[in-house]
Image (cartoon, helix red, strand yellow):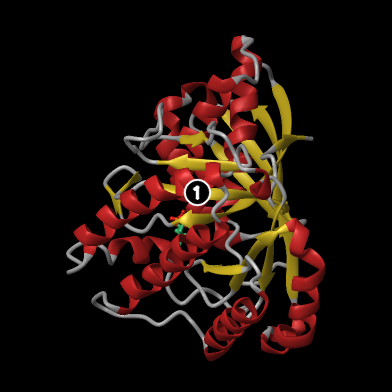
């Protein structure tokens, strides 16, 4: 029996890819496997109130940080259209979606991963309530499957501390359809890893990720890139166990630069880094050379720089950021985050 009303609230974190997903096939299928650290503080909290209505179809209202947000509606509508075949019980409900982010609204940090995963979990809570299912591994698997249909990388945001997505011969149970939490041995250095996000450019992304993935179709280097991602992921899986920080740095920084190289060599081409992005990268390399630190950088499809480092180096790295890097950040802003455990029900 379908309840007349139901309410569910989930908070879901953002994630930062170590091996990047860039390029997809029909049906939100990744062109290559990827893996990410789940973040902790950067999160979206979403409450959905479901109310049964007389008219057919699904309708929804959306509040973002307490205000109506018409510009988000098409993406949510597309998400609902895509998931409906897997959640037919939603037919006949009106959804009041109330969502907010823990990170500043225009920070250049994409909220699609945290937002779509939080929303998918709210919908799954209604399904679980209807079927009497537990919030077990299958619950998360289907929630991840749904989140993927909203935004590919969102399927890596539900659990932690690391989640892969996409079939890979060395990851048992890996799938193109949902994220798989990393179940291998994790070297102790990665148990307390930090991500300090330097906000170099807080503006809107110049290239939406939909357009970005599209650029990999017919890209002259696409096949080589997809194979490289497979190899890098295989190597990274070993590094996660043996804690080899030099190999970690080499893979993660190369992945970040390759992502941008793909954009620079596509048709049309884009440069998403800013001069300050490069200034920061050079400073990070100098710092590492001088101190032997395990600090490294990675990038998303934008100019902001994610600094990754073990918690044991936090004091030195924070001093370095304050002394040498804040001036490259817009309004001196950065966000301190760390590896997290995944989404939480509120
Ligand atoms: O999930 P999307 O479609 O927004 O794509 C995100 C792609 C990158 O963030 C650039 C890389 C990744 O694997 O997260």
Snapshot quadrant of residue 322? bottom right
Q: Is residue 224 visible?
A: yes
Q: Is residue 55 visible?
A: no
The vertical placement of 26 against 7, above or below, is below
Mark 1 vs ligand 1: CB under 8 Å? no
Front residue of 37 and 346? 37
User: What is the count of numbered marks?
Assistant: 1
The percent position of residue 40, horizontal first and vertical second, equals: 72, 50
Q: Is residue 241 left or right of residue 345?
A: left
Residue at 67% across, 44% down: 188
Image quarter of the N terminus? top right
Q: Is residue 191 left or right of residue 284?
A: right
Front residue of 268 and 242? 242
The percent position of residue 125, horizontal first and vertical second, equals: 65, 25
Q: Which residue is mark 1?
A: 239
The percent position of residue 307, horizontal first and vertical second, equals: 63, 68
The vertical placement of 72 against 13, above or below, is below
Residue at 55% across, 75% down: 204
Element type at marker 1?
helix
Snapshot quadrant of residue 94? top right
Front residue of 284 and 223? 284
Image quarter of the C terminus? top right
Residue at 32% across, 49% down: 230
Q: Is residue 317 left or right of residue 256?
A: right
The percent position of residue 5, horizontal first and vertical second, equals: 71, 24
Residue at 32% across, 35% down: 169
The vertical placement of 305 against 173, above or below, is below
Please tell me how crowded label 1 is: few (under 14), some (14-19), or many (20+) other residues with Cα within 10 Å.
some
């Amino acid at each position: 029996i379908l309840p007349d009303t139901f309410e569910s609230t989930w908070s879901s974190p953002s994630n930062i890819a170590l091996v990047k997903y860039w390029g997809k096939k029909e049906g939100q299928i990744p062109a290559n496997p990827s893996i990410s650290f789940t973040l902790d503080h950067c999160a979206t909290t979403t409450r959905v109130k479901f109310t049964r209505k007389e008219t057919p179809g699904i309708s929804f209202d959306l509040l973002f940080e307490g205000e109506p947000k018409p510009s988000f509606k098409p993406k949510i509508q597309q998400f609902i259209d895509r998931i409906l075949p897997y959640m037919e019980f939603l037919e006949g409900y009106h959804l009041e979606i109330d969502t907010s982010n823990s990170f500043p609204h225009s920070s250049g940090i994409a909220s699609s991963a945290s937002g779509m995963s939080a929303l998918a979990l709210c919908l799954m809570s209604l399904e679980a309530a209807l079927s009497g299912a537990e919030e077990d591994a299958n619950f998360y698997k289907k929630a991840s499957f749904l989140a993927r249909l909203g935004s590919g990388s969102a399927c890596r945001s539900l659990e932690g501390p690391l989640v892969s997505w996409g079939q890979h011969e060395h990851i048992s149970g890996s799938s193109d359809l949902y994220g798989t939490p990393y179940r291998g041995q994790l070297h102790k250095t990665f148990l307390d890893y930090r991500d300090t996000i330097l906000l170099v450019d807080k503006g809107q992304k110049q290239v939406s990720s939909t357009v970005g993935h599209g650029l990999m179709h017919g890209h002259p280097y696409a096949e080589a890139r997809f194979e490289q991602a497979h190899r890098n992921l295989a190597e990274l899986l070993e590094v996660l166990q043996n804690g080899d920080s030099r190999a970690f740095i080499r893979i993660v920084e190369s992945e970040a630069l390759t992502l941008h190289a793909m954009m620079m060599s596509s048709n049309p081409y884009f440069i998403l880094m800013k001069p300050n992005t490069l200034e920061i990268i050079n400073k990070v390399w100098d710092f590492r050379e001088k101190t032997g630190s395990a600090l490294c950088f990675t990038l998303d499809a934008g100019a902001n720089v994610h600094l990754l480092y073990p918690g044991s180096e936090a004091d030195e790295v924070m001093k370095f950021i304050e002394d040498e890097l804040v001036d490259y950040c817009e309004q001196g802003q950065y966000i301190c985050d760390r590896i997290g455990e995944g989404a939480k029900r509120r």
